[in-house]
Image: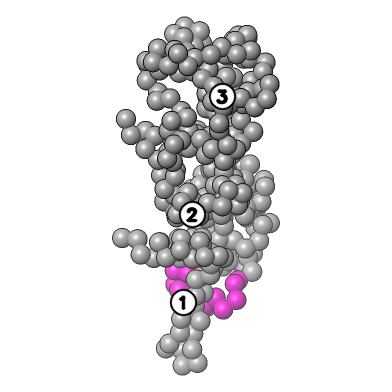
Amino acid sequence: MNKRKALGRGLSNLIPTETDETISNNEKDLSYVDIDAVHTNPFQPRTDFDETEIEGLARSIENQGLLQPVVLRKTGDRYEIISGERRFRAFKFLQRDKLPCIIKTKVSDREMLELALVENIQREELNEIEKAISYQKLILEYDYTHDQLSKQIGKSRTVITNSMRLLNLPEEIQTMVRKNALSMGHARALLALESPEQQLDLAKMIVSEKLSVRDIEKQIQKQKENKRLKPAKQTPVDPDLAHVLEKLQYKFGTSVKVKTGASGDKGKVEIEYYNKDDMLRIFDLLTAV
């Protein structure tokens, strides 16, 4: 299957393929460890686990057995989860004393983070904020470039950069995204606002009034027309051009300005970027077919 195609070289060897025959094919490597000696992955990007989902998985394991063992790394006298935290939580729910597992001894912290991130992303179990935090950690702490990370997890560089920009939003808005009260589209639209207070006010309005992304665009325009938002410097008076600029700011997720020459016939359009990766993200958007 192509499910693990994006795993880095060597990483796929650390996670068994997910087939019904996994346990039987790995019986020689299968161990049973004291469940109280098992600890969660300290690099686990997923922080929100649905208890109802865990209970459902527990009942499935109780009725059908465990099709895929948990993968652990041994560190001293304890074990840390490489892959399978949901299964571990299900066993805890069932109050089992022993956990079926495969034990790995040579797994670095970097591989622990990579594996947890890739596994969750491929299974679509991370919310957008958890993804953004994981991307940022790999880039800042493990010296990944955006290109390297893109190849590793099978996501485009633009997707990664747009995801990380969500971390510029106020914490309360990030919580809304984590709880799926706001979508990625909503959050990207809010990034066009310069003031955190404005972002938060509009985010609360989105939730209370169930606004769509298009509704947000209209609301921002309406607020500007009513002078409830401070206009950006050199914003054209022409309302049609102002509307086009607003759409461009939403598309690129950054400030877009028009500067007109003395004659009024010539000028230039400026698109602001924050670093080299952000510049490349904008180039990708400009050249996308």
Residue 58's tag is: none
**Viewer-closest of 61 and 23:** 23
Q: Is residue 222 left or right of residue 247?
A: right
The part of the image, by quadrant, that contains residue 285 is bottom left
Q: Where does label 1 land, which residue?
A: 269
Element type where label 1 sits in the image: strand
Task: Using a 10 Å C-alpha cutoff, classify the residue at mark 1 as few (fewer than 14 neighbours), some (14 to 19) or many (20 or more).
Answer: few
Relative vertical location of residue 154 with respect to residue 99 in this rendering, above or below: below
Q: Quadrant of the N terminus?
A: top left
Q: Earlier in the sequence, mark 3 or mark 2?
A: 3
Q: Where does label 3 land, which residue?
A: 72
Disc number lying in front (1 or 2)? 2
**Viewer-closest of 89 and 180:** 89
Confirm whether residue 89 shows in the render.
yes
Q: Which residues are magenta?
A: 231-246
Q: Is residue 4 magenta?
A: no
Q: Give how far apart the Cα atoms at labels 3 and 2 are.
A: 29 Å
Disc number lying in front (1 or 3)? 3
Q: Is residue 173 left or right of residue 210?
A: right
Q: Is residue 233 magenta?
A: yes
Q: Residue furthest top?
A: 63
Circle 2: residue type: His
Circle 1: residue type: Val
Residue 146's tag is: 2
